[in-house]
Image: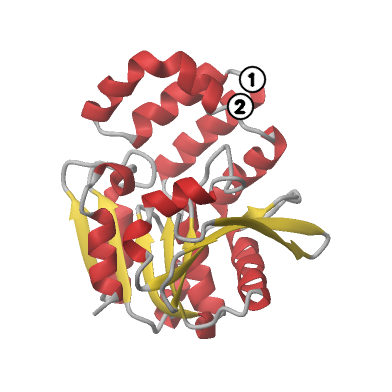
Amino acid sequence: MLSARNRSLQTGSTTTDYAVFGNGRRPLVMLPGLNTRGVKGSALMLSVMYRMFAKTHRIYVIDRKNHIPAGYTVRDMAYDTAEAMEQLGITQADVIGISQGGMIAQYLAIDHPHLVHKLVLGVTLSRNNPTVETVVGNWITTVKKGDLRAFTADMLDKMYSETYGRKYRPLLPLLTVLNRPQNPERFLRLAEACLTCCAYAELDKITCPVLVLGGRKDKIVTGEASIEITEKLGCDLYLYDDLGHAAYEEATDFNRRILEFLNK
């Protein structure tokens, strides 16, 4: 579908997986949030999820590199994303960053402004707060202990609305299997990197148009984090009053709002 392809490229001494699809001429780079599975092998699924953008854009969903060194930061991730974009010949792209991907996207726009045409920041933050430190710290602890059921249950509770939580809670045993980190050490280092975002003081270096989307009931980064970014940048904000961190999955108009912003 939509010429979906799974690909990888060499980034330093390791590789970076990405998916590419879409028939449009404008480049769109999508940076997903922290997850246990990665982008590899998911091009077809992603092309279905984001088919709304395929008429106007050529879409690149870029993962983090496969070998993650100790002490890796979200700013390091932005540097590696910029390297990947340059290898692919992408400049002046529309960029969508979700959760940790939004942290990376901020630094991409700060440090590599020539690569970013418009910026969308979904359910993310620009600096740490006690909520994210507690939640991500708990995930790190449970994964280190090997308690994947507790890890998955907490992710389900923290990410989704009560309605979605009740719907999927009976599937917890299956979700625990599906949510098992393919590479626990890599996942842990990526999770630790979530706590290194401190872009707030440099947000005024972002000069491209920005749209912020958040969930007022976000139990991971908080809804206040979205408001904070918006107030600093003076940009557009849409906050889903009844949704949390998974607003990008639960809100049926999430992608439509992004597309309208990109097509202005």
Who's the residue at 38% across and 82% down the image?
208
Who's the residue at 31% across and 74% down the image?
262
Give the amino acid at mark 2. Val
Q: Which numbered disc covers residue 75? A: none
Image side of residue 83 versus residue 174, left or right: right
Question: Is residue 99 in sight in this rendering?
Answer: no
Question: Is residue 187 in sight in this rendering?
Answer: yes
Q: Residues within 10 Å of mark 1 (few under 14, many from 20)?
A: few
Q: Nearer the viewer, residue 23 or 242?
A: 23
Give the amino acid at mark 1. Gly
User: Does 110 appear above or below 153?
Assistant: below
Asked if labels 1 and 2 touch by Cβ distance under 8 angstroms, the answer is: yes
The number of discs equals 2
Query: On the rendered image, what quadrant is the N terminus found in?
Result: bottom left
- Return the residue at label 1: 146
| Distance (Cα) linking label 2 and label 1 | 5 Å
Query: In terms of secondary structure, where does tag 1 sit?
Result: loop
Who's the residue at 39% across and 17% down the image?
171
Who's the residue at 51% across and 24% down the image?
151
Q: Which numbered disc covers residue 143? A: 2
Image side of residue 70 versus residue 197, left or right: right
User: Does 262 appear above or below 166?
Assistant: below
User: Does 247 appear above or below 135?
Assistant: below
Q: Nearer the viewer, residue 123 or 26?
A: 26
Please state the horizontal and vertical placement of residue 120, each as a whole percent of the image. Answer: 36, 66
Please state the horizontal and vertical placement of residue 193, each as a whole percent of the image. Answer: 60, 50
